[in-house]
Amino acid sequence: MALRIAGVFLPDDEPRELWIDGGLLTDEPVSGAETLAEGCWVLPGLVDAHCHIGLGPEGGVSHDRTLQQARADLAAGTMLIRDAGSPSDTRWVQQDAALPRLLRAGRHVARPKRYIRHLGAEVEPEQLVDQVRHEARSGDGWVKLVGDWIDRGVGDLAPLWPADVAAQAIAVAHEEGARVTAHCFGEQAVHELVAAGIDCIEHGTGLSDEGIADMAARGTALVPTLINLDNFPAYAAPAQEKFPRYFTHMMDLYERRHRTIGAAIEAGVPVYAGTDAGTVVEHGRIRDEIDELAAIAGADYALGAASWRARTWLGADSLTPGASADLIVLDADPRQDLSTLRRPRALVLRGRVIG
C-alpha cells in the first residue's frame, strides 16, 4: 500500500510531503496513497552504532534469543545496527525484512585471558594481522579490536597489542576495504590506536586533550556508550581489594567521563550513539543513550548522532527520494521534546508500518 506523509522531515525545518511506494520514498505524488500522518515530525530510523546482536554474557546466544534482541531494538526505533562484535553468525538477521538492518563486524579480536571469555577470537600479537584480515573478509566493512583490558600482572588497564603490530593490523584491514574500531577504557591504548590510523574508538574514557585533538584532526569517530559507562563502579568494585590500582583508575575514568566526552564533542570529534547492548546492557535502550548524550551536547546533536549523521557515517539512506522508507513519525519536534521519541505515532521499516 502506498502512503503519504506531510510534515517536517528532520533534520530540515520546513514542512513538505513525501510518499512511500514500493518500500521507497518519493517526492512524486502517488495516486490512491493513504495518508499516514499530517502535521507531524519525521525522523530517520534510529541507529545503534555499538550493539551486540547474537551475544549474551556467556557468549553466543540462540536463534530465538537473537530474534528477541533484534525485536527489542526495533521496538525502540532502532532500524540500523552496527554490530560491535559477536561470536554468533547473524547473517540470517540480514535476510529478515522484519528486522533492523545489520552491519556485522564479526568477532572481537582479543588476547587469551585478556578479555571476557567466550566472546572474542583470541590470538597472540604475532597472529593479529592474519586474524584481522580474516575478520575484515567475513564481516560487513568493520573489524573490532579489544584495545585494552585489565592486565593482572600489572594490576591495571593495559594495551593488548604492541603499537607497531596494531598499526600493521589496521593497515591490513584498510587494504581489505574495512574500517577498524576498538574497545578502549584507559589512556595508553586509545592514543596509540588513534595515532595508528584507527577509524573509530569505543568508550574513549581515557582520552586526553591531545588525543582528542588528534582524533578531531584525523576525523576519527567516537562511540562513547554512555549508558554502559554508568556501570564502571560495578565493574570496578569486585577488584577493589585485589587490584586497587585498577579500581582507582576505573573510578577516576568514571568520574570524568562526561567531561571527556563533552571535550571531544566540543573539539569536533564525530560522536555517534551506541548502547553496548548484549551483555550488561539490555537491548532496546537507544533512547536512554540519546537522553544521556543530549545532557552533554543538546537534543539536536544527540538526535543526529543516533539518526541522520550516523546514517551518513555508515553509508545508509536517510529521508531522501529513492531511499528506503525507514522512519519514525512523531507528534512533536524531538529537538524540543525528546520524550516524544517514546510515544511514536508510527514506526515504518522498509515502507511497512510496524508500530
Image: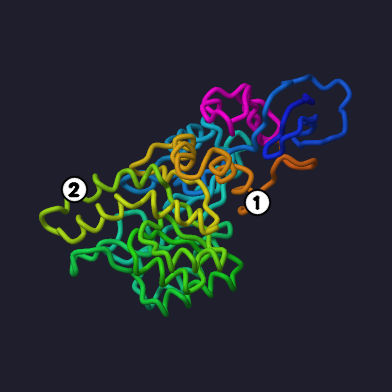
- In percent of width and height, residue 81 lies at 54, 45
- Badge 1 crowding class, 10 Å Cα cut-off, few under 14, some 14 to 19, many 20 or more, is few
- In percent of width and height, residue 323 lies at 74, 42
Secondary structure category for the residue under label 1:
helix
Residue 311 falls inside the magenta stretch: no
Q: Which residues are magenta?
A: 326-355
The answer to whether residue 314 is above or below residue 35 is below
Do labels 2 and 1 touch, CB within 8 Å?
no
The amino acid type of the residue labelled 1 equals Thr
The C terminus, quarter of image: top right
Residue 348 falls inside the magenta stretch: yes
- Badge 2 crowding class, 10 Å Cα cut-off, few under 14, some 14 to 19, many 20 or more, is some
The amino acid type of the residue labelled 2 equals Ala
Secondary structure category for the residue under label 2:
helix
Residue 48 - label: none
Q: Residue at x 41, y 42 (%)?
A: 277
The residue lying toward the viewer, choosing from 31 and 112, is 31
Which residue position holds label 2?
A: 237
The answer to whether residue 227 is above or below residue 271 is above
Any part of residue 69 in sight: no
Residue 62 found in image quarter: top left
- Of labels 2 and 1, earlier in sequence is 2
The residue lying toward the viewer, choosing from 169 and 198, is 198
